[in-house]
Image: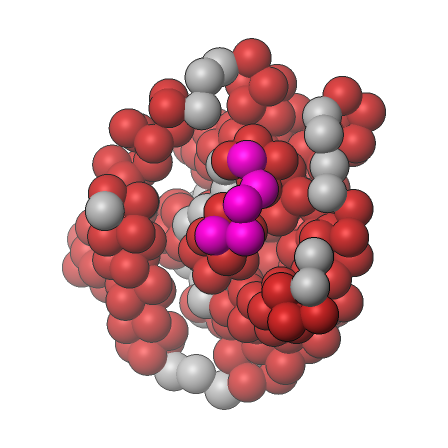
Amino acid sequence: MTPLEGLAVAGAGVVAGGMNAAIGSGSLVSFPILLALGYPPVVANVSNGLGLMPGSVSGAFGYRRELAGRRTLLVRLVTMTSIGSLGGAALLLVLPPDAFEAIVPVLILLALVLVVLQPWLARKLAERKRHEHGGPALLVGVLAVGVYGGYFGASQGVMTLALMGILMDEHLQRLNAVKNVLTATAYLVSGVVFVLVAEVAWLVVALLAVGAALGGLVGARYGRRLRPAWLRGLIVVVGIAAIVQLLF
């Protein structure tokens, strides 16, 4: 890796870490850069997940104020995410790379629809009592998103925000804080699997990690200042870019 390539990877880590903390879908910046540098898709995906984990951790730390009083909820959701991401990581190692290229655009599109409809759905759901912690449906949904996160991970944050926004009676910024914790969990659990059995580009991981940790703190600081409508708009823009990128 040349110095210029190393700088590009570290810069991608900063941008991806900031996006993951404030919006989600940071992998849509870093993953294509690794592919452009010639890394095989699975190696790029594995190394990308490991490298971005510190960014999600620092993003969660930056949102620690919004996490106050959510310990019970976090334990439940982290457990489901851990189980799901473990299964997703296993799927990545046993299924052909072409498999997720067909389904991922559909999943991201579904997530965007949920984000756009969330205010309308929230008003409809307000007519009946929503569980403060989302109820069983949230646990099942987080498990499914965890599988996706362990398998590929791009837009996991978008899906998680959409799911929680529909099922939980909570402010979007507090949900964004929980999202950061769940994203970090998925990266960590799948990363353990990948370290043990998959090929990892460790220089890429190190460069992404340094950049993502810095970006996560910056994203958490400024993401908190975004109004919910602005945050949804950014999520939609990033999600559409993800679909275009994956299809073309």
Residue 229 % position (x, y): 30, 76
Residue 107 % position (x, y): 31, 37
**Pick the front one: 208 or 214:** 208
Q: Is residue 159 above or below residue 59?
A: above
Q: Is residue 128 above or below residue 61?
A: above
Residue 69 is left or right of residue 102, and the answer is: right
Residue 4 % position (x, y): 64, 71
**Pick the front one: 11 or 150:** 11
Residue 242 is left or right of residue 16, and the answer is: left
What is the image's colouring?
secondary structure
Residue 79 is drawn in which quadrant?
A: top right
**Pick the front one: 150 or 163:** 150
- In the picture as drawn, the residue positioned furthest to the top comes out as 94
Q: Is residue 54 above or below residue 7?
A: above
Residue 110 is left or right of residue 211, and the answer is: left
**Pick the front one: 12 or 103:** 12
- At a point 76% along the width and 21% down the height, the residue shown is 197
The stretch in magenta equals 36-40
Q: Is residue 111 magenta?
A: no
Most frequent secondary structure within the magenta stretch: loop
Q: Quadrant of the N terminus?
A: bottom right
Residue 78 is drawn in which quadrant?
A: top right
